[in-house]
Image (cartoon, grey):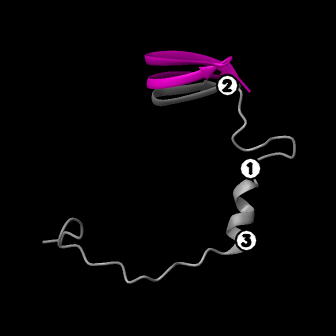
Amino acid sequence: MLPQHDGENCEEDDGEEQEVDDADLENLSDDLSDDEQPGKQDNLVLAQFEKVSRTKTRWKCQLKAGIMHVNGRDYIFNKATGEFQF
């Protein structure tokens, strides 16, 4: 049997703060190139994927329950399919 540690009978936090290493903070932006700025995307798609397949450089995906921000407008969708190359 596992004890439950949330709700009214939860043990209080002991007040200790965990230290974050400066090297960890510096590595957060390693994936961005010099000309990219974090949070400045013009177009964005957020969704759950159902299926993803790839043939050489062509990718096909089936998405569900998503939202898109394209050309300054927001779109909500239940299902979508997409193909792209890179």
Q: Is residue 14 above or below residue 69?
A: below
Residue drawn at (48%, 29%) of the image? 47
Secondary structure, mark 2, is: loop
Nearest to the eye among marks 3 and 2: give it.
Answer: 2
Q: Mark 2 points at which residue?
A: 43
The numbered dot on residue 73 is none
Residue 32 is situated, as x and y percent measured from the top left of the image, at 77, 47
Q: Name the residue under label 3.
A: 23
Residue 5 is situated, as x and y percent measured from the top left of the image, at 23, 70
Q: What residue type is labelled 3?
A: Ala
Q: Is residue 69 left or right of residue 50?
A: right
Quadrant position of the N terminus in the picture: bottom left
Is 79 magenta? The answer is yes
- The front one of 14 and 36 is 14
Q: Which amino acid does label 2 sit on?
A: Asn
Badge 3, how many Cα within 10 Å: few under 14, some, many 20+?
A: few
Secondary structure, mark 1, is: loop
Q: Name the residue under label 1.
A: 31
Q: Tell me the chief SS of the magenta region.
A: strand
- The front one of 14 and 53 is 14
